[in-house]
Image (cartoon, rainbow, N blue to C red):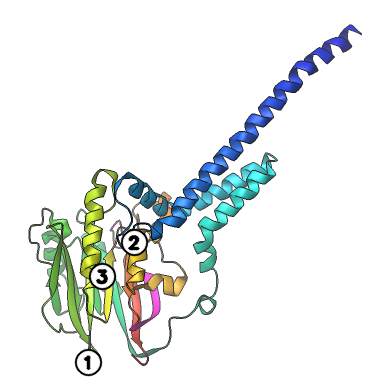
Amino acid sequence: MAGGGLDEAVNAVAGPRSGCLGRLRAAGWWLLAGSAAVVVAIGLLAPSLGAPDPGLPGRFGYWAETITALWRPLGSALLGLAIAAWWCRRRRPAIAFVVLAVLALWPELWSLLPRGLRGGSGAGAGPALRIATVNLNEFGEDEAAMVTGLRQLDCDVLVLLEFTPRWERVLAAQSVGDHVHRVISDPGGAHTDGLRVAIWSRHPFAGEPETCLLRGYNAQLRAPIVWQERTFWVHAVHPLPPLSLQYAGVFEQRRQLLDWLRTSPRPRIVAGDLNAAPRSALRARLHELGWRSAGDDVHGQSPGTWPMDRAWAAPFRLAIDQILVDDHFVVDDCVVGPANGSDHAPLLATIRWRAGR
């Protein structure tokens, strides 16, 4: 009787305590799910924020930009939380995490569909044009790998970023292709040699190139190229990355870049390092201006191109290097080019004139 009375006393104390802990655990799971829902909501709204500007200025705009950049790992983390919640027998939070994960990973699921089901970009006509964008990396040291990589691209139009005087000397001393038509951005008031960009072409230029200095120092370049007796404009772009300490300046650069691109003649192509994730407001504005991502056209979502110098980051690489075309072009293919020692992968697209345009 004494032993039984002791057990009853222990159970009387432990029962309310375990019930309290259970409620705390349940509240913790729902708090985590609610926080995740807020983050996902910001990520879903981010592309439409601040139109016609490239998002919102200030701290909130920076965090919205950060969420879009981490969209793929966020979806993976939500899927992991769903599995953990199910394992802990928290069925409803687990279902909530699954719904949030599907919202975040929808681009991944969409890309699994055959290209025909995702909608084709139309029929092309005539020979194909190969265009590539390559970030040389101003601090890159493997010059032999870069020269070999450029030769292997074998492209008709080549957009080169971070085209420092050193890289200019290295590439001038090597035979990397028969691009006899070459222009380099006017450095203007550039503080950094790494902000120079260049356009090399096998096809002649139709006129003088134009330079836009973002905030007075970051040179962007566009040049008219004659191909199959028609002229199109290639834009070599490289706005700065959205780091927190300089986000106000980056936001202003993006706004100026959009203003400049709005004045572009057609047909037109944008190639370079946008330093903007696919779900960013900048990419949304470019889409609204009539540019399509060649990588999205072919794969459903563009291949990741940065960072290439960190093997552990392979699942989380960002598709910030882009080739964008307007509706005058059809994209046959878009692939990551051969490794060249840079921290960015080169991107190569094969395009044709759209039939009937």
Residue farthest along the top direction in this orientation: 2
| Residue lying at 16% horizontally and 67% vertically, measured from the top left | 171
Mark 1 belongs to which amino acid? Glu
Residue density around tag 1, few if under 14, some if 14–19, many if 20 or more, within 10 Å: few
User: What residue did someone put label 2 on?
Assistant: 51
Instruction: Name the image quarter holding residue 177.
Output: bottom left
Res. 85 in view: yes
| Label disc, if present, on residue 150 of the rendered structure | 3
Q: Does the magenta stretch include residue 317?
A: no
Question: On the rendered image, what quadrant is the N terminus found in?
Answer: top right
Instruction: Name the image quarter holding residue 284.
Output: bottom left
In the image, 143 versus 49, the foreground residue is 49
Vertical order, 20 against 36 (above or below): above
Check disc 2 and report its element: helix, strand or loop. Answer: loop
Check disc 1 and report its element: helix, strand or loop. Answer: loop
Residue 85 picture location, percent across and down? 64, 42
Point out the tag, 3 or 2, that comes first from the N-terminus. 2
Q: Which of marks 1 and 3 is in front?
A: 1
Q: Compute the Cα span from label 2 to label 1.
A: 37 Å
| Label disc, if present, on residue 229 of the rendered structure | 1
| Residue lying at 61% horizontally and 34% vertically, measured from the top left | 27
Residue 321 picture location, percent across and down? 32, 63
Check disc 3 and report its element: helix, strand or loop. Answer: helix
Per the rendered image, the range of residues in magenta is: 328-344
Q: Compute the Cα span from label 1 to label 3.
A: 27 Å
